[in-house]
Image: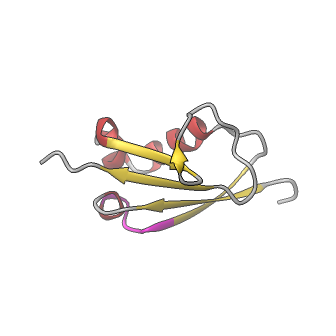
Amino acid sequence: MQGMICITVGLTDPAADLVGNKTLEYSLIPETQLGGLIALLYAKYPKLADKSASVQIELNGQPADMQAELVEGDEVVINLQDQE
């Protein structure tokens, strides 16, 4: 689809175990905020949403701001701090 941006989401263990994959790719409309992508992930993967209090998110290797606008080629990494 024309005008879409491609974003890569990397998941470290144990987040990858909850989702079933270490890497996800999304095509999003331009000006999508990081918080919107995270909400999409939580809706698609309820087990990940259940652990949201333990989730750490990075955008391009830096601590994430949920209001940051995503751009083509951004890399989001989701770390889950195991609390068990």
Outermost residue, top direction?
A: 67
Q: Quadrant of the N terminus?
A: bottom right
Q: How many marks?
A: 0
Residue nearest the viewer, comparing 45 with 55: 55
Outermost residue, right direction?
A: 2
Where is residue 52 shown, x and y percent of the image?
34, 39
Outermost residue, front direction?
A: 62
Residue 50 counted in the magenta span: no
Q: Is 77 on the left or on the right of 82, as rendered?
A: right
Quarter of image, res 16: bottom left
Q: Residue at x 49, y 62 (%)?
A: 10
Q: Is 83 on the left or on the right of 2, as rendered?
A: left
Q: Residue at x 44, y 43 (%)?
A: 42
Quarter of image, res 73: bottom right
Residue 19 counted in the magenta span: yes
Q: How is the image coloured?
A: secondary structure
Where is residue 80 shown, x and y percent of the image?
32, 50
Q: Residue at x 46, y 43 (%)?
A: 43
Where is residue 75 shown, x and y percent of the image?
60, 57
Where is residue 65 shown, x and y percent of the image?
56, 34
Q: Residue at x 41, y 68 (%)?
A: 21
The range drawn in magenta is 18-23
